[in-house]
Image (cartoon, rainbow, N blue to C red):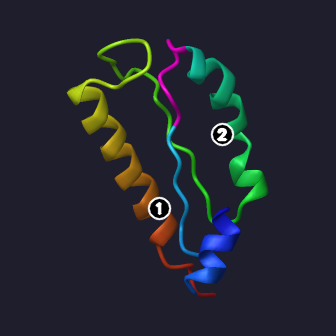
Amino acid sequence: MVTDLRTDLGLGEVPFVPGKLLYSGCCGTAHNPLLRQLPYEISNTRVVSATGLSGQDAVHFDLPGQRGLGARYGGAMVELLKPEPQS
């Protein structure tokens, strides 16, 4: 899907940053190990952790959790968008 979107939209190697799900929910235990593998399968990808983030229930992040995840997305994008060092 990521490769198709990049190709169809002419985006080149635009960064892809998925976030892990809450570890307390059923989806987190099933999907987070799969998300961890994405950087090995999809170029220019970083997965952000949900460690320490809180939820309003077992599945949904609460407002502080959403803000924390957003900050982690931002940090990952900054790293992915840094220019390569010139030698």
Query: Which region shows up in magenta?
Result: 20-25
Under circle 1, the secondary element is helix
Magenta span includes 52: no
Report the residue at 65% width, 29% height from top: 31
Q: Give the percent coordinates (x, y) of residue 22.
A: 47, 22
Q: Nearer the viewer, residue 86 or 19?
A: 19
Q: Nearer the viewer, mark 1 or mark 2?
A: 2
Q: Quadrant of the C terminus?
A: bottom right
Q: Main secondary structure of the magenta part?
A: loop
- Residue that badge 2 annotates: 35
Q: Give the percent coordinates (x, y) of residue 27.
A: 58, 22
- Mark 1 crowdedness (10 Å alpha carbons): few <14, some 14-19, many ≥20: few
Asked where in the image residue 54 lies, by quadrant, the reply is: top left
Q: Give the percent coordinates (x, y) of residue 18.
A: 53, 48
Toward the left, the furthest residue is 63
Q: CA distance from mark 1 to mark 2?
A: 19 Å
- Residue that badge 1 annotates: 79
Q: Give the percent coordinates (x, y) of residue 50.
A: 46, 29
The answer to whether residue 31 is above or below residue 39 is above
Magenta span includes 24: yes
The answer to whether residue 87 is above or below residue 49 is below
Report the residue at 31% width, 45% height from top: 71
Under circle 2, the secondary element is helix
